[in-house]
Image: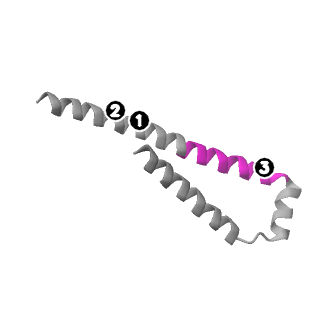
Amino acid sequence: MQRLKYICFTSVLFLFSFCTFAQAADRQQTGFMNSNGKIYVVMAVVVLIVLGLFLYLYLLDKKISKIEKEANAHSSRS
């Protein structure tokens, strides 16, 4: 099961890399964000959102695993 999760996660990351290559960055737009120093704020917000999503998924997986173990223990007693 862990191997399947690893393969799926790697596949998703690989597909996201294609999306980033497909988007051409306009030099004028990125220059504007860099000149104002706002690009770092945008990147910080994006990183925080992604980390929050991963943390949420991790905690959700732990809760689901705990519920599954309790259900298996309850069904084995019956």
Q: Are marks 1 and 3 in contact (CB under 8 Å)?
A: no
Magenta span: predominant SS is helix
Indicate the amino acid at tag 3: Tyr
What residue sits right under mark 2 in the picture? 66
**Extent of the magenta region:** 37-53
Q: Is residue 71 above or below residue 57?
A: above
Please tell me which residue is depicted at 47% across the width and 44% down the height of the picture.
Answer: 57
The tag earlier along the polypeptide, 1 or 3, is 3
Please tell me which residue is depicted at 48% across the width and 54% down the height of the picture.
Answer: 8
Label drawn at residue 62? 1
Label 2's element? Answer: helix
Q: Are marks 1 and 2 in contact (CB under 8 Å)?
A: yes
Please tell me which residue is depicted at 41% across the width and 35% down the height of the picture.
Answer: 62
Left or right, 2 with reference to 37: left
Q: Position of residue 27 (x, y in %)?
A: 84, 69
Among the 4 quarters of the image, the one containing residue 69: top left
**Quadrant where the N terminus lies?**
top left
